Image (tube, helix red, strand yellow):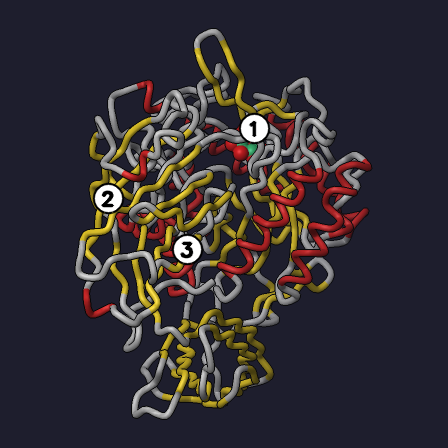
Amino acid sequence: MLRPRDTPTRERRSLNGLWDFALDPSGGGRAAAWWTQPLTGARQIPVPASYNDIFADASVRDHVGEVWYQTSVRVPERWAGARIMLRFDAATHRATAWVNDVQVVEHEGGYTPFEADVSDIVELGAENRITVAVDNRLSWQSIPPGYVEETPDGLRQRYFHDFFNYAGLHRTVWLYTTPRSHVADLTVVTGLEGAGGTVTYQVETAGGDPGEIRVALRDAEGAEVARATGGSGELTVEGVHAWRPGEGYLYELAVELWGAGASPVDAYGLPVGIRTVRVDGIRFLINDEPFYFTGFGKHEDSAVRGKAHDDALMVHDFALMEWLGANSFRTSHYPYAEEVLEYADRHGIVVIDETPAVGINMGLSGGIFGAQGFTTFSEETVNAATQEAHRQAIRELVARDKNHPCVVVWSIANEPESDTPESRAYFEPLAAETRRLDPSRPVGFVNVMLAPADKDVISDLFDVLMLNRYYGWYVDTGDLAAAERNLEAEVGAWVEKHGKPIIFTEYGADTVAGLHSVTPNPWTEEYQVDVLEMCHRVFDRIDAVVGEQIWHFADFATAPGIMRVDGNRKGVFTRDRRPKAAAHMLRKRWQNAP
Ligand code: GCB
C-alpha cells in the first residue's frame, strides 16, 4: 500500500488539527446516525493523539466502546476529475468513517492504514463533513486479544499485554488525489553482486489503461543510474552505493505512466535502499556481513499524546539512540507510524518489524508471569477467527512495509503460547503465509521465558530465535550469580537444539529513576546496570548471540497493577527521556565512548 506523496500528478492535504470529539458511553451513536449532523456536546480534541490522557477526565481515559470524531474540509474545485482518497494512517483499534451522509470505509486493526475512494461522494468547492467512530474494544477475535467485562460499575476492558490500551486517531488523516489511471502499488526487492546492485521491481496499476510504464532509478544526487519500461523487471546499478546499518543511502525509483500527452498521467517516487539480508547458520548477515543488533524494544508512548505519532518525539528518540550508539530497535508490539520507518531508512537504523499480536498467552497476565485462568487456544478464546485476524494483520504489515530497507526481520507475534500442539497448529500456517508474502526477509516470533528450548514446539518454523529473558528480575531476583548461571545454561540449550542466530529482544529490570543503593537492590539504578552487564557477559561468551535489544527504551504507561509503579519502569530513559545510569553504561558499550 503506497504512502500518499505530493508528486507532479498527486496532491495531499493533511486533516490534522483540532476535531470535534464525543464519547458514546451508551453506544447509541449509530442508531441515532451521529454522522448525519454535528456531534452534540462535542469537545475539541487534537488529531493525531490518543484521546485517553488529553482531558482531566477518567471517563474519557477509561472509556470502553466507541468514540466519535468529526471535522469538515473544503475540497478544492481543482480536484475535479481526480481520484480523491480519504486515508487514515491508523485508527486504534477499529473504525468506521463517513463522508457527509455516506459510510465510506470500515477497518479492523489499530496500527495499519486504510482508505476509501471518495471521489463520487465529496462535493467540490464546498465543506464536507467527515465523521469517524473509533472503537477501542478488544475481543478474543481481535489482534491483540482481550475481552470486555460487564461489572456493576460498567464495562471494563481486560487485556493480556503490558501497555495501556490507548486509542483514537493516532496518526495523520489525509485527503489526497491520484489520477484516475494510477500507480496502485510497487514492490521492490534488491540484490548485491560484487560492485553491482539490482532492483527487481513490480508496478501494479489501476483505473484503466496505464499506457506505457516507465521507471528510472536515481541516486541520492538525482542522477539517473538505470531505467526501464514495463510493469516489472530488473534494474542493474554499476558501482552501487549500498544501504547499510549506520548509513541509510537511498536511491529513488521514479515510476511514471505515460499516455499520448506531453507529461506523465501519473508519477510516483519510492525511496529504495539496496541491501541484502539473510541468515547463514548462526550468523545474521546484512550485505553478507555479520550484523550484531544493539538497541531496544520500544513503544509508541509519551505523556499526553499516548500512542500518537509526533515528529519531535521521533527525531528526539532517534537522537538518543544515536547518542547511545544503538543500531536497531523492534517495533514492539505493533507496526509503528510509517514516518518512523522512513526515518530509519534514511538514517541506517535496522528494524525488527512486529505485528500487533501480543498477549496470545494465557500463562501470562498483562505480560507478567501469572496464569489468567483461560486456555489460550479454544473455541471460546483464541480460535480460527482470531487466527484469520492475525493472518490479516500480517498481510497488512507486509503490504505496508515490504519496501523499507530498514526492515530486516518480520516478527509475527510477541510471547505467544509456543509449547503446545495447539500453538504449532496455530503458527505453522502463519509462518508459511509470511514467507509466501515476502520470501526476501527472515521471519521470526518472540519467544517467552515460559517456553525454553526443551518445551518450545514452534521455533523450527522460523529463521531466527528472538528471546525475551528476565533473569535477575522475574526470576533470580536480586541474585545475579544465579541469574548469570541460569541464563547461560538456557542459551546453551537453544544453541544446541537449533543452531540459529539468537537475538535477545528483551532483558532488563524495572528501575525507578533516582533510587540508589550500595548493595544489589532491585528497582535501583545500580541494579539495572548490574542486570544488563550480567546479561552482556553471557551474550559476549556465546557466538550464536547476534543481538541485544534491551527492554525498554523509555518508561511507559500500562494498565494499573501492583507490579507497576505508574507504568513499566524498565526504561533506560524515563518517560520524559532523561537518562538513567544504565544509559551512560550502554553508551560506553555500544559507542565505545569514554
Ligand atoms: C515481556 C513483554 C513486554 C513486557 C515485559 C515486562 O516479556 O514482552 O511487553 O512489558 O515483559 O516488562 O514485563
User: Amino acid under label 3?
Assistant: Glu
User: Amino acid under label 1?
Assistant: Gly
Image quadrant of residue 414?
A: top right
Circle 3 is placed at which residue position? 115
Residue 460 vertical placement versus 437 (above, below)? above
Real-space Cα distance between discs 2 and 3?
Answer: 17 Å
User: Amino acid under label 2?
Assistant: Thr
- Label 2 sits on a secondary structure element that is strand
Circle 1 is placed at which residue position? 146
Where ligand 1 lies, by quadrant? top right
Say whether residue 348 is visible. Answer: yes
- Label 3 sits on a secondary structure element that is strand
Circle 2 is placed at which residue position? 71
N-terminal of the two: label 2 or label 3? 2
Image quadrant of residue 77?
A: bottom left
Residue 232 image label: none
Front residue of 164/4: it is 4
Q: Nearer the viewer, mark 1 or mark 3?
A: 3
Whether tag 1 and tag 3 are in contact, CB under 8 A, the answer is no
**Does residue 405 appear to the left or right of 220 in the view shown?**
right
**Number of numbered tags placed on the structure image:** 3
The picture places residue 369, in percent across and down from the top left corner, at 62, 23
The picture places residue 502, in percent across and down from the top left corner, at 66, 50
The picture places residue 422, in percent across and down from the top left corner, at 78, 36
